[in-house]
Image: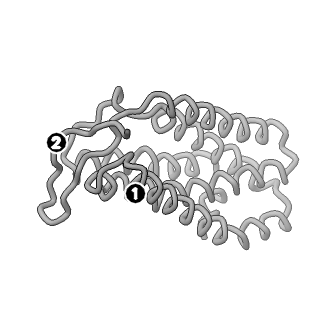
Amino acid sequence: MLTNVLRHGPLLAAAASLLVSPGMMVALALIVERRAWLLVEQYTAFVFGDVALAGAVAAGAASWSRTPASVRVLIDNWQWTVLAAGLIAGLLQWRLEFNQGSYSKGQSLSPTKIWHQVVIIPVLATWVLSAIVAAVGSGDVVGSLIALGCVLLWGVLIVYDFSHPKPAHVDFDWRSGARHGQPRAPR
């Protein structure tokens, strides 16, 4: 189950979250897209916000053992619904960005863009929401404030990034396995 990450303590939970993002995004950019991953070209919500989300997941994991069984069962039962909702949200965002011309077809189908839309959004949404409910449900005020503060920081960075577009994805051709040109910022 997805919430198993919360059951193994804050360090493993944070590490799993960081592996999903930014870890795999960096690996996909370097290995599959064969491009340099430059910090200056990345969105602040990706670089710092996703690290903050890992902090939220860690705070929930730290509270997990004190979370009442009824709340843990609730989290276990609804996680697939949250995952599905996150996947739908990621797919809708993907389509909207493409239809608005924010990304070219090649950018929309790049490995990093696919990973972002179909893995990062649903998985982190599930882990973060589960972590918040675990922390709040446990009565852990400090853990709840940390988790909520981390999500608030991520939200502030998302708002900031709307007015500071970055060259996040490259045009990628799956037939040749090659990227075309350098990443360009969405329009």
Residue 13 position within the rendered picture, expressed as x and y whole percent measured from the top left: 58, 51
Q: CA distance from mark 1 to mark 2?
A: 20 Å
Residue 37 position within the rendered picture, expressed as x and y whole percent measured from the top left: 28, 37
Q: Is residue 133 above or below residue 22?
A: below
- The tally of labels here is 2
Q: Secondary structure at mark 2?
A: strand
Location of the C terminus by quadrant is: top left
Which amino acid does the dot numbered 1 rest on?
Trp
Q: Secondary structure at mark 1?
A: helix
Q: Residue 69's mark?
A: none
Residue 173 position within the rendered picture, expressed as x and y whole percent measured from the top left: 18, 59
Q: Residue 181's mark?
A: 2
Looking at the image, is mark 1 or mark 2 earlier in the sequence?
1
Residue 176 position within the rendered picture, expressed as x and y whole percent measured from the top left: 11, 62
Q: Is residue 68 above or below residue 13?
A: below
Marks 1, 2: nearer the viewer: 2
Q: Is residue 43 above or below residue 171?
A: above
The answer to which quarter of the image holds residue 110 is: bottom left
Give the class, few, some or many, for how many residues have Cα within 10 Å of label 1's Cα (few <14, many ≥20): some
Q: Is residue 62 above or below residue 47?
A: below
State the residue position of label 1. Answer: 115
Q: Is residue 56 left or right of residue 122?
A: right
**Residue at image location 79% in from the left, 68% down from the top:** 74
**Residue at image location 66% in from the left, 36% down from the top:** 150
Which amino acid does the dot numbered 2 rest on?
Gly
Question: Which of these two is toward me, 9 or 121?
Answer: 121
Location of the N terminus by quadrant is: bottom right
| Residue at the limit of the structure toward the front, as seen here | 100
Question: Which of these two is toward me, 1 or 181?
Answer: 181
